[in-house]
Image (spheres, helix red, strand yellow):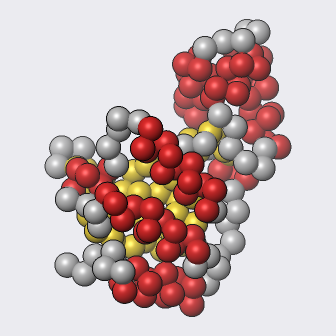
Amino acid sequence: MEGVKRREVILRELETATKPISASRFAKEFKVSRQIVVGDVALLRAQGTEILATARGYLLEINRDRQGIVFKIVCQHTLEQTEEELTTIVSLGGEIIDVIVEHPIYGDLTAGLHIKTAKDIDKFIKSYKQSSASLLASLTSGIHLHTIRCADEESAQRIKEALAKKGILYQG
């Protein structure tokens, strides 16, 4: 399938998707390499299509749930506390949209997480443990920010209080 047609199909499928679609799934469907799909998505983004790349695949920005409030928190914890941090946020109704660290050369580095459920946490932790990659927070002595979405201010406060009680919310 020619590139222009492939990108049309990718866009059409993303427009109706309710959850992320992986580059590997697209690659299998089109009988091309995963890297070809990554390039196709890059071209779509360059044309102005707002496509989010999550750990589980691609999602159109317009398909994201925009209800509730969005806020940032600063956390610091050990690598062993990562799952506890994520579980605390999700169990209190939060979605972890991203993680941000400040790099001395590049400035802010942001990685989309889009973790909403315990299953998402399990996949993230399993992926981390199976890879040789480091978490971004390892670049900054564990200090990092998260962008969180939740239903209301009350939920946001519960999340902050629970993380503070566990010693995960950065106090400076």
Q: Nearer the viewer, residue 147 or 92?
A: 92
Up the image or down, 46 lies above or below 167; here it is above
Horizontal side of residue 127 vs 8, given as left or right:
left
How far across and down, in percent of the image, does residue 148 sit? 51, 69
Quarter placement of the C terminus: bottom left
Horizontal side of residue 72 vs 116, given as left or right:
left
Image point (50%, 46%), residue name: 126
Q: Nearer the viewer, residue 121 or 146?
A: 121
Image point (69%, 37%), residue name: 21
Horizontal side of residue 10 vs 53, given as left or right:
right
Image point (28%, 63%), residue name: 78
One can see residue 168 in this view = yes
Q: Residue reaching furthest top?
A: 2
One can see residue 109 in this view = no
Up the image or down, 10 lies above or below 6; here it is below
Residue 17 location, quadrant: top right
Image point (31%, 79%), residue name: 167
How far across and down, in percent of the image, does residue 72 sit? 42, 71
Query: Could you tell me how many numbered marks the image carries?
Result: 0
